[in-house]
Amino acid sequence: MIGCHLSVAGGLHHALVEAAALKLECVQVFTQNQRQWKARRLTREALDLWRRRRVARRPVVSHAGYLINLAAADPALRRRSIAALRSELRRCEALGIGVLVLHGGAHNGAGEAHGLDRVIRSINRVHRGLPDGSTVLCLETTAGAGTTLCGTLEHLAFIRRNVDEPGRVGVCLDTAHLFAAGYDLSGAAQTQDTLQRCEAVLGWDAVRAAHINDSKTPLGSRRDRHEHIGHGHIPLEAFAEVVNHAYLRTIPLILETPKAVAPDGRSWDEVNLAVLRGLLE
Ligand SMILES: [Zn+2]
Ligand SMILES: [Zn+2]
């Protein structure tokens, strides 16, 4: 199912109104300002407006804030991250959002093993504090820049294997991040190979959502720059493999491409959606 990340400016329900207008099959939102620690208070009015616009057949994915770093070596930052993630999950539960996407964090020089261990222990603490949650926390594949974790599928598999409650932890793939991290999507055959590797390392049941972005930077560049579909280094044949894949076509595939007006006067979201839909067989 194909959708977009949409803005919640003016209220969370605005994303649902726009999703309907764009005829999306799924939608992704931030349930709070993604660059701040301070959590948005979910008022009864906001919840009512949300529920009124919510349609069961259009799944919603939430993306967690960017400040959260479960791998942080600084204990104060890790505690703050754990509290913020719990609050993200609580908002998802209140809003009936089944999937929360989170960046794995960065070890800031402490080393990958220490970073992964801190992520695992932090997730366990988050889950112990929310024993009845049903929202699945999905760690996202990253471009692997600097000391960022989860630039390899093995990191994601390792975290899932070692958390106390693996059923509450999933994965969100991102085509631009995979490509920048060195996973080849430069043609149909290469994409089939990369997707087979995803299945072999993670298993499809772990993958609950994917971000569909073209990459402004080349294969293995380790730089995360999203581009409009068909305008970057990933060819349309690769996107066709993804959107028509027997498993991937059944989960939310979310565009996170730049927002603006395209040269033909349509919004870029409309243009990118039309390109992806045109690839469907
Ligand atoms: Zn992300
Ligand atoms: Zn990205």
Image (cartoon, rainbow, N blue to C red):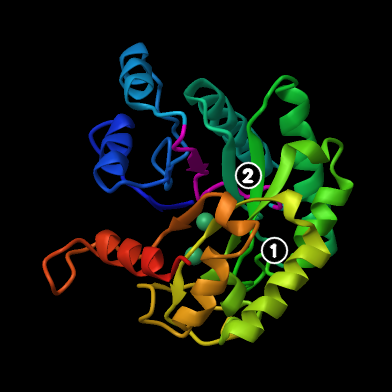
191 or 157: which is nearer to us?
Answer: 191
Disc 2 target residue:
77
Asked if the magenta segment contains residue 59, the reply would be yes
Q: Is residue 178 visible?
A: yes
| Predominant SS of the magenta segment | loop
**Can you name the residue that lies furthest to the left here?**
265
**Circle 1 sits in a helix, a strand or a loop, which is it?**
loop
Residue sitting at x 55%, y 65%: 244
Residue sitting at x 66%, y 51%: 139
Which x, y percent locates residue 195?
69, 71
Distance between the alpha carbons at the discs numbered 1 and 2 = 17 Å
Q: Rate crowding at label 1 as few (under 14), some (14 to 19) or many (20 or more) other CA atoms within 10 Å.
A: many
Amino acid residing under circle 1: Leu
Which residues fall within the magenta stretch? 57-71
110 or 147: which is nearer to us?
Answer: 147
Q: Earlier in the sequence, mark 1 or mark 2?
A: 2
Question: In which quarter of the view is residue 194 placed?
Answer: bottom right
Disc 1 target residue:
149
Residue sitting at x 31%, y 39%: 15
Which x, y percent locates residue 250?
58, 50
In the image: residue 78, left or right of residue 10: right
Amino acid residing under circle 2: Leu
In the image: residue 122, left or right of residue 222: right
